[in-house]
Image (cartoon, rainbow, N blue to C red):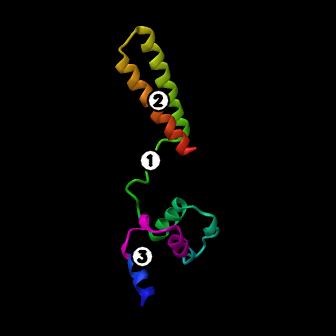
Amino acid sequence: MGKKKEQKEKKEKPLDRWTVKELREEALTIPDIQGVHGMNKDELLTIIKEARGIVDADTGKKGDSLREIKEKVVQLRIARDEERSQGVSRLRLSLLRRRIARLKKKTRRAG
């Protein structure tokens, strides 16, 4: 009786909320897929959604690539240096510093 309840709950909740173990079990039922146990959650979700024909609304661009983020950091540093030489307010320099720090944090997560 407990198994049926687990299966019912698994079918009701969206795929994004499934655990990796549940996603692997589901991916094993799909033919022509190999290497399921070596995949992470994002890869498993992608494969299962493709097999089921589910189209994600956010499949376009999940986030900036590492290279794009680093390019933004370089551009912000150039802008900061130019504005510092022009003598802009400390508030503006502080804003640029925080933006750079936020982007650098993204690179550490993405990398």
Q: Is residue 75 magenta?
A: no
* 10 Å crowding of disc 2: few (<14), some (14-19), many (20+): many
- The span from disc 3 to disc 2 (Cα, nearest Å) is 41 Å
Q: Does the magenta stretch include residue 26?
A: yes
Compare marks 3 and 1 and give the one earlier in the sequence: 3
Compare marks 3 and 2 and give the one earlier in the sequence: 3
Q: Residue at x 62, y 68 (%)?
A: 37
Q: Give the range drawn in magenta.
A: 12-27
Q: Is mark 3 on a helix, strand or loop?
A: helix
Q: What residue type is labelled 1?
A: Lys
Q: Which residue lies furthest to the top in this view?
A: 86
- The quadrant of the image that shows the N terminus is bottom left
Q: Is mark 1 on a helix, strand or loop?
A: loop
- The span from disc 2 to disc 1 (Cα, nearest Å) is 22 Å
Q: Which mark is residue 10?
A: 3
Q: Nearer the viewer, mark 2 or mark 1?
A: 2
- The span from disc 3 to disc 1 (Cα, nearest Å) is 28 Å
Tag 3–tag 1 contact (CB < 8 Å): no
- 20 and 65: which one is in front? 20
Please name the residue that numbered disc 2 is placed on: 100
- The percent position of residue 51, horizontal first and vertical second, equals 49, 69
Please name the residue that numbered disc 1 is placed on: 61
* 10 Å crowding of disc 3: few (<14), some (14-19), many (20+): some
* 10 Å crowding of disc 1: few (<14), some (14-19), many (20+): few
Compare marks 2 and 1 and give the one earlier in the sequence: 1
Q: Which amino acid does label 3 sit on?
A: Lys
Give the side of residue 14 with respect to residue 23, left or right: left
Q: Which amino acid does label 2 sit on?
A: Ile
- The percent position of residue 36, horizontal first and vertical second, equals 61, 69
